[in-house]
Amino acid sequence: MFGYLQVQKSELLVREFEAYKAVYCGLCKQMGKDYSFLTRFSLSYDCAYYAMLLMSFHRSCSGFIDRRCTFNPLKKCRFALTESDSYGKAAAFSVISAYFKLKDDISDSRLFKRIMYRMILPFFSHWRKKAAKKYADIDNLISQMMDLQYEAEHNLECSVDRAAHPTAFLLGNIFSLEAKDETDRRVLYEFGYQLGRWIYLIDAADDVVQDKKSGNYNPFIDSNGKIAKVDYIAAVLNQSLARAYDAYNLIDLTDFKGILDNMILKGFPTVQNKITDKLYTEVKNE
């Protein structure tokens, strides 16, 4: 995951922001417990969002507890408690994703970074295998996504839609695993698909100028090396976010709904606007 699923802090109530941090800290604690304290460095806002979404969908938050921070014992933290396996799934998702990201980085990085990543990979390989034993569905879907992404990005005629499909496919299927019936499955798949599509494309938009300089693949760079118009990039992103919101409104959420509403209505658009505003400055459109 990429870290784009953020709250708009200034628009949250104080208690809501404290609850948001409590979920983040709860997931951090779970990752250390299930795997290693080192895996906490792979924790992202996106995986915290996944945990919070699951807890809200399953109505499983059972309260909060104050304890010493498991990462920094000198600091006190509030931890959100849950009666479901939301933290376990989010921790596994984070570890498995980090493993495949490392493998991808090894093939794309320069010598020094490649050596460093190869040194770290055996640890994440071990943690990934441990996660896959309990959450085989998540591991299989992430593995499929990586294969689809490789095929798409090595296709000379790959379109923006095809490039974004693997990440969209992954989140669509990951979210639909939680469905209680066919209606839930369709709604959760659509929400996950559109959100995954947005995440892939917002990351591509964020990196497009750097990718042009380095020669890396980017769906917003054509075969002649020209970056797409920023208005087009913004329109593509708006389409995915709007369709994700339409599906989101059909999901029955309870716990943390105010925070989740804040994120899709204000947090995600704010992240997008920062990136597109930066592009308007960096990219010269004629």
Image (cartoon, grey):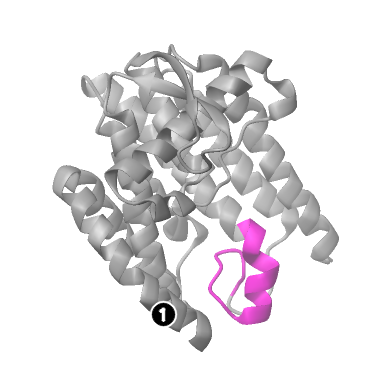
Please report the residue visible at 43 percent of the width from the left and 31 percent of the height from the top. Answer: 26
Q: Is residue 109 shown left or right of residue 284?
A: left
Q: Position of residue 248 (x, y in %)?
A: 47, 24
Q: Is residue 69 shown left or right of residue 215?
A: left
Q: Secondary structure at mark 1?
A: helix
* Quarter of the image where one finds residue 221: bottom right
* Quarter of the image where one finds residue 178: top left
Would residue 211 be counted in the magenta stretch?
yes
Q: Position of residue 99 (x, y in %)?
A: 34, 62
Query: Is 70 in front, or is 140?
Result: 70
Please report the residue visible at 35 percent of the width from the left and 13 percent of the height from the top. Answer: 59
State the residue lying farthest toward the front: 74
Query: Is 245 in front, or is 76?
Result: 76
Badge 1 local density, few (<14 within 10 Å), some, or many (20+)?
few
Please report the residue visible at 73 percent of the width from the left and 56 percent of the height from the top. Answer: 230
Q: Is residue 54 shown left or right of residue 105?
A: left
The answer to whether residue 285 is above or below residue 63 is below
User: The C terminus is located in which quarter?
Assistant: bottom right
* Quarter of the image where one finds residue 191: top left
The answer to whether residue 264 is above or below residue 123 is above
Residue 147 in sight in this render: no
Name the residue tied to disc 1: 107
Q: Position of residue 234 (x, y in %)?
A: 68, 48
Residue 280 in sight in this render: yes
Query: Is 133 in front, or is 193?
Result: 133
| Magenta-highlighted residues | 205-222
State the residue lying farthest toward the bottom: 111
Q: Amino acid at mark 1?
A: Ser
Please report the residue visible at 45 percent of the width from the left and 61 percent of the height from the top. Answer: 163
Would residue 178 be counted in the magenta stretch?
no
Query: Is 70 in front, or is 257?
Result: 70
Q: Position of residue 63 (x, y in %)?
A: 42, 12
